[in-house]
Image (cartoon, rainbow, N blue to C red):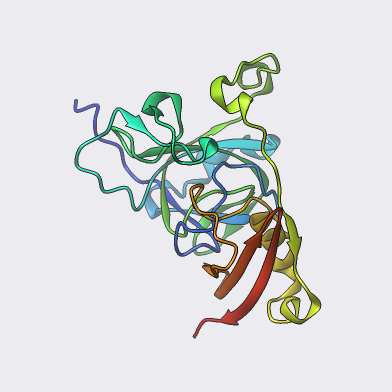
């Protein structure tokens, strides 16, 4: 048996067509939603029996746009400003020997759809639309939660959220149901860690809209929002 072979069992549908703008970790922006739709082979309802009793699940998935043919032993984590190198196994960089991601997300509900079978509604996502899912496991507090854990260099750099300036004019350009999620994404500062240009206009695609913004000091200002055709 070839233990290197894994099969896509599902794909997650999210509001991010590209990686720019996606939170760097799962669970940071709980308002971000996703739908996990399974491949026909895995739509047997028996496989989901008991899953509704868990509030959180682990998703094991594959990075869509990590195409490196050779892995690098050292990477530059955003947490350290993108200028300091750390060993790849001390980070969650997508540039790994195997392009696998691991996310802990909230399981909001399970729908049993007539066409797609069991569909998982999840929140706190950090994945591009159509990301392949390779496995799902329940989150178990007694085994998975470690309140006394030491977090290495991550614990030395505190996460600081930006103040989001999102005025009424721009809010009216995108449906209200996306406001909370968008504010959460912007507060995390979507820019590359090594960028600090107060005059530059950045942008990312979210929920069918092009969101453009500027960052000055500790404030991120929505510059414009336009609907994609």
Please name the residue shown 65% across and 75% down the image.
223
Q: Which residue is nearer to you in this view: 119 or 189?
A: 189
Q: Position of residue 176 (x, y in %)?
A: 76, 72
Q: Which residue is nearer to you in this view: 140 or 81?
A: 81
With respect to residue 164, does 3 lie above or below? Answer: above
Please name the residue shown 75% across and 66% down the image.
165
How many numbered badges does the structure rendering display?
Answer: 0
Q: Position of residue 188 (x, y in %)?
A: 64, 50
Give the quadrant of the N terminus: top left
Q: Quadrant of residue 199?
A: bottom right
Please name the residue shown 39% across and 46% down the image.
9
| Left or right: 81 in relation to 105 | left
With respect to residue 189, does 142 lie above or below? Answer: above
Q: Position of residue 99 (x, y in %)?
A: 33, 39
With respect to residue 87, does 119 lie above or below? Answer: below
| Left or right: 129 in relation to 215 | left
Please name the residue shown 24% across and 30% down the image.
4
Residue at the far right in the pictured view: 168
Q: Position of residue 174 (x, y in %)?
A: 68, 77
């Amino acid at each position: 048996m070839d233990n290197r072979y894994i099969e896509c069992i599902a794909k997650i549908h999210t509001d991010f067509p590209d990686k720019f703008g996606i939170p760097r970790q799962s669970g940071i922006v709980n308002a971000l939603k996703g739908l996990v739709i399974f491949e026909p082979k895995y739509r047997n309802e028996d496989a989901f029996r008991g899953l509704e009793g868990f509030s959180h699940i682990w998703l094991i998935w594959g990075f869509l746009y990590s195409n490196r043919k050779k892995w690098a032993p050292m990477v530059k984590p955003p947490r350290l400003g993108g200028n300091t190198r750390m060993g790849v196994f001390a980070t969650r960089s997508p540039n790994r020997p195997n392009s696998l991601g691991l996310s802990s997300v909230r399981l909001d509900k399970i729908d049993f759809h007539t066409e797609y079978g069991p569909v998982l509604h999840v929140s706190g996502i950090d994945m591009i639309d159509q990301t392949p899912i390779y496995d799902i496991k329940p989150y178990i507090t007694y085994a998975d939660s470690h309140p006394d854990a030491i977090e290495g260099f991550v614990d030395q750099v505190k996460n600081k959220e930006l103040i989001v300036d999102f005025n009424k004019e721009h809010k009216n350009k995108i449906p209200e149901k996306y406001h909370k999620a968008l504010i959460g994404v912007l507060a995390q500062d979507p820019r590359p860690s090594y960028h600090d240009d107060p005059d530059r206009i950045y942008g990312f695609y979210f929920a069918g809209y092009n969101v453009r913004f500027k960052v000055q000091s500790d404030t991120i200002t929505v510059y414009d929002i336009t609907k994609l055709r």
